[in-house]
Image (cartoon, coloured by chain):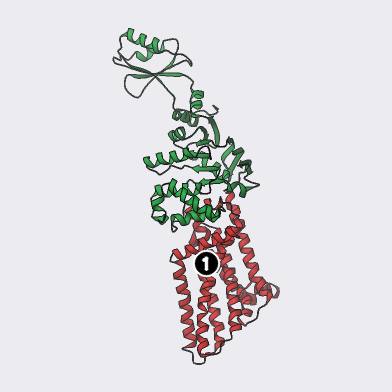
Chain colours: A red, B green
Amino acid sequence: MRNILTIAGKELRSYFTSPMAYVLAVFYLGIIGYIFIAIFLLMPQAQTEHLRDLIGSMLFLTLFIIPMLTMGLFAQERASGTMELLMTRPVRDWEVVVGKFLATVSLFASVIIISMSYPAILEVVAKVDWAMILTGYLGLLLAGAAFAALGTFASSLTSNQIAAAIIAVFMLLFLWLVGALSYSVSQSLGDVFKHLSVMENYQDFSKGIIDTKNIIYFLSLIFVSLFLAVRTIENRRTI
Amino acid sequence: MIQADGLTKYYAQHPAIVDVSFQVEEGEIVAFLGPNAAGKTTTMRILTGYMPATFGTAQVAGFDLAEQSLQARRNIGYMPEAVALYPDMRVYQYLSYCGRLQGMGKAELTERMEYVIDRCGLSERASSIIGTLSLGFRQRVSLAQAMLHDPPVLILDEPTVGLDPNQIVEVRELIKSLAGDHTVLLSTHILPEAQMTCERVIIINEGEIVAEGSPQALTAQLRQAETLLVTIRDDDGTVARQIKNIPEVVDVRSAEQASSYYVETEVGSDLRADLSKFIVEKGWGLLELRPVEMSLEDVFRELTTEEKGVA
């Protein structure tokens, strides 16, 4: 546990010593703010339920933000050669993977917590359904963590950060769009696609429903991705 | 403290090292000497637990690198060949990160950090951002992190590469002073370095160990002839041929300067008196006559360029 926290702490700090964290946070919160204004100040018939769409757009943005946060996790260590020393420390491979993953998740969590100020602002003038908002955020956090796990895996595959980001975005886009494919294939395959889809599994959260099925989906996505990242790193040792 | 048994490592089909076996006793400083791409780094990466060997086993501080990798790694301080540090961290931040990964407690870490920062001459740079440091200082930071957790075994891959002559001397002194309490295996392709810092040398070439022993033993072992350097004044061109006719002389080669010759004689013979008499009698004007010691450099060249298997 200590090793995981040490690695997570170091990664978090390096997010903030590079402009990365600030640029992405400003970009993310800025766009969300713009959408917030567009919905609630410019649309006369806006309802507080529209916050659901706001969180939906946050999820879509997350798809692009997370790969930028995860791309360097391993790719940079490999490119700069620091991987060698890290891998000769008395630290297990999975501890390194989990530590780095947690750094990205905690940065993402802090950014979305800041974004809660938007519904809080709305609370001043209208009645906000906080239960719905919080389940939406729970879904967003789970999805963001799953994206981060996939991004961690993508970063373990290469020493090129840009390649790592592109691999991650494509994998995430696949999981995003696979649900749409379900209507153009056979029923049984369509069901499989639906189960794989991020959108399908997120929807219930946005409606204020917490379903274990969806939680298991995101948790297994996290587990499988991190497992693959650990295996990739183990294999990379042998060549 | 370090035990390698039949280490073999293949990269795809190409063997980087073949059947490398050696032992380093507690408190010894041993140089791992070889030309570039001889397999030094590969061997060290196996010994530090960075990657497994294809065949063979290795133990460090009594722990098997394959079976008890974490325990073994706890006992090793490693300075990799490419000095790779996190450029955005400050020196003390980096060292503290390394120490925590090595499982050091807070009090111990503070104390050891102070110690290695001082020993490695980093006192004035402790709060510098690593990215702004010169190569020499980065090298010291790399050495500092290897020493930080006071490991019984230090594995240093080319520790003096990229340093200026003064720094090289400092680092060598530092490494020498670690002997006794620490077991040190350092790799180098610089011969005087091995000769000056180490008690024992292991020479590796094309992935195989070709010789092993103290620098003195190695040079003695490889001496196949006694060599005398002779310089004369009046060379009429027949000197080499005439000296060669002396019975005990094996060979005569021209030396670097004009009218100088290396005279090789049978092992154990001392021809200095006879040869000087001979030259004086011929009236060639003897300017210089002295025995030539084979340096480790010659040993190294002999082993790594010509036929192998001397050891």
Secondary structure found at label 1? helix
User: In the picture shown, does residue A67 fall above or below B182?
Assistant: below
* Residue furthest bottom as drawn: A44
**In x, y percent, where is residue A212?**
68, 75
| Chain under numbered label 1 | A
Considering the image in quadrants, where does the N terminus of chain B appear? top right
* Vertical comparison of B119 with A20: above or below: above
Left or right, A213 with respect to B99, comes to right
Name the foreground residue: A161 vs B64: B64
How many numbered tags mark residues here? 1
* Residue under the point 48% across and 74% down: A28
Q: Nearer the viewer, residue B96 or B22?
A: B96
Q: Quadrant of residue A145?
A: bottom right
Rendering coords of residue B130 (x, y %): 42, 55
What's under tag 1, amino acid-wise?
Pro
- Residue B201 point in image, percent of width and height: 51, 33
- Residue drawn at x 29%, y 14% as measured from the top left: B234
- Quarter of the C terminus of chain B within the rendering: top right
**Vertical position of residue B200 compared to residue A226: above or below:** above
Task: Please say if A131 is above or below A167.
Answer: below
Residue B229 picture location, percent across and down: 38, 19
- Look at the image and tell me whether residue A211 can be seen: yes
At label 1, counting other C-alpha atoms closer than 10 Å, the crowd grade (few under 14, some 14-19, many 20 or more) is many
The residue lying at 34 percent from left, 11 percent from top is B279
Q: Quadrant of residue A100?
A: bottom right
Residue A154 in view here: no
Which residue carries the number 1 mark? A67
Q: Which residue reaches farthest right? A: A188
- Residue nearest the viewer, comparing B135 with A206: B135
